[in-house]
Image (cartoon, coloured by chain):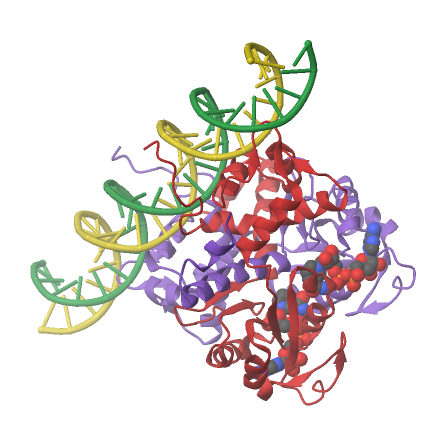
Chain colours: A purple, B red, C yellow, D green
Amino acid sequence: MTSRTPRPRERGIPEATVARLPLYLRALHGLSERGTPTVSSEELASVAGVNSAKLRKDLSHLGSYGTRGVGYDVEYLIYQISRELGLTQDWSVAIIGAGNLGRALADYGGFGTRGFRIAALLDADPKTVGREVAGLSVRHIDELEDVVSDEKVSIGVIATPAAAAQGVCDRCVGAGVGSILNFAPVVLNVPEHVDVRKVDLSIELQILAFHEQRKAVGRRGPGWADALEV
Amino acid sequence: MTSRTPRPRERGIPEATVARLPLYLRALHGLSERGTPTVSSEELASVAGVNSAKLRKDLSHLGSYGTRGVGYDVEYLIYQISRELGLTQDWSVAIIGAGNLGRALADYGGFGTRGFRIAALLDADPKTVGREVAGLSVRHIDELEDVVSDEKVSIGVIATPAAAAQGVCDRCVGAGVGSILNFAPVVLNVPEHVDVRKVDLSIELQILAFHEQRKAVGRRGPGWADALEV
DNA sequence: ACGCCCTTGTGAAAGCGCGCACAAAGTGGG
DNA sequence: CCCACTTTGTGCGCGCTTTCACAAGGGCGT
Ligand SMILES: NC(=O)c1ccc[n+]([C@@H]2O[C@H](COP(=O)([O-])OP(=O)(O)OC[C@H]3O[C@@H](n4cnc5c(N)ncnc54)[C@H](O)[C@@H]3O)[C@@H](O)[C@H]2O)c1
Ligand SMILES: NC(=O)c1ccc[n+]([C@@H]2O[C@H](COP(=O)([O-])OP(=O)(O)OC[C@H]3O[C@@H](n4cnc5c(N)ncnc54)[C@H](O)[C@@H]3O)[C@@H](O)[C@H]2O)c1
């Protein structure tokens, strides 16, 4: 019981922690640019918008990289978090669907800054294929398998209409893509070993609407909705 | 104990449930379009990609809208969830920042379909102001307060560069906006009564990279990283 | 009218995540 | 060298979330 765990980083960082590490990383880069050499958990937590105890516990999952009485060395912590997240290597990303969203993503500078390289932008529409976007020529969707294989693409970003998303997803998986970021408003079915994350604007707005309505009901006085009930 | 709760919907639906209701709603709309009259928790859960027990517990927070032995009436459930989320009324949304992302959002049809109306698209750049996007003329950021007040905007979408986001956010809050959807990679500080949700591409990619790296380590055999440790 | 079968709604248990509060550990001053 | 001060790393309890498992409830066939 008192025997300390031999490995600081056993196996498996809590998912909630993983989701916050990029947040810390962003905050640390901000500090780094301002030349700050060290930072306390209190300060860093404040910048990242989280509780300081949570921050410390999160970081403790990577190892003991802080110095008691001092704080964390900014550069060293950036390196450790980056390594843990796998950002010390480059990742090739393919964006499928060169519509409004796909083009905005491709054109977005912030992508490349963290080691993500846009290997290709693909589309099915002949009128869109060949078009130049952000220094990339839009390629035809049938080149997907070649692109994934040649460019070692491991992350696919789906920005096609909802109806086409599952089909595109299947092709990505078949070609060897291991992770998918889905913008289309559908639930994608994938094999066990493939990770999917979704971004859904509409869902976010609906959640905001719910809370907004709650506030409105509060102002109006509770109980008004009873008139609608049977 | 056996006395049934007088109110089916006491007060406060769990946040995790609220976040899934839009998912169910989307699935139900799909079923509705296909003319399906009723659906069981098992089927609906499958379409929405969740566990059926979780679905039933989620729905039970709104009331007892199912029929044992049969399932849920699709249209009725759509209405109940919509009402709970506050989608039976319209919400005015202002998009601030008419760059790549802001224009893509404004041009996105799926926005309006769930009762969200884009009241205005604003920008600070004189070259962008006046430009026509998706039937809207881009207005100057200084009109923000007027727009919010005149159009009863309660939700603000921030699509400006990170450096401008907090300032824009403050102006939104000052003008009376109660909810903010933030695309800029910064943590926004807002008063207690304002809700903020964020969408961050870069974070999503980093989370995917983490898992991708894990898979790679697994294939390569564990323990290889020890060589880097002191 | 009755009983079978299906599905809901929900206790209960297990799991996970959060944050308090504090001991341990390292720094710097005298 | 020692002591006071600062900050980390974490044990612990609490509340939220998920999942199981099943009793209660309702339709439908006979
Ligand atoms: N634009 C937004 O702000 C926004 C917001 C939320 C969600 N979305 C979702 O993102 C997706 C894309 O949105 P958008 O506004 O860019 O749509 P869009 O219609 O502008 O672009 C879709 C593109 O996908 C291409 N495409 C269609 N089928 C394809 C296939 N099988 N393979 C490859 N490409 C194919 C089309 O040719 C088109 O260029 C949609 O699912 C939409 O619901 C968009
Ligand atoms: N494009 C993407 O795919 C993407 C992805 C992830 C995150 N983001 C983030 O979304 C935001 C917008 O991205 P983008 O690609 O559209 O950038 P962009 O540079 O194309 O557009 C930003 C727009 O905001 C306007 N602006 C600047 N200051 C303003 C102010 N004070 N008030 C009003 N408008 C102002 C600019 O004039 C410009 O039109 C950025 O913070 C970016 O980091 C974008």
Asked whether A59 or A169 is in front, the reply is: A169
Q: Is residue B221 left or right of residue A35?
A: right
Measured as percent of width and height from the top left, residue B224 is found at 54, 40
Q: Is residue A141 left or right of residue B179?
A: right
Note whether residue A212 is visible.
yes
Q: Quadrant of ligand 1?
A: bottom right
**Residue located at (67% from left, 36% from top):** B38
Asked whether A19 or A99 is in front, the reply is: A99
A54 above or below B90? above
Measured as percent of width and height from the top left, residue B125 is found at 66, 86
Image quadrant where residue A104 sits: bottom right
Measured as percent of width and height from the top left, residue A176 is found at 74, 42
C19 above or below A1? below
Quadrant assignment for the N terminus of chain B: top left
Q: Is residue C2 left or right of residue A145?
A: left
**Residue located at (61% from left, 54% from top):** A89
Which residue is most to the right? A126
Image quadrant where residue B87 sits: bottom right
Note whether residue A98 is visible.
no
A198 above or below A170? below
**Residue located at (61% from left, 71% from top):** B93
Measured as percent of width and height from the top left, residue D13 is found at 24, 42
- In this rendering, the count of numbered labels is 0
C5 above or below A62? above
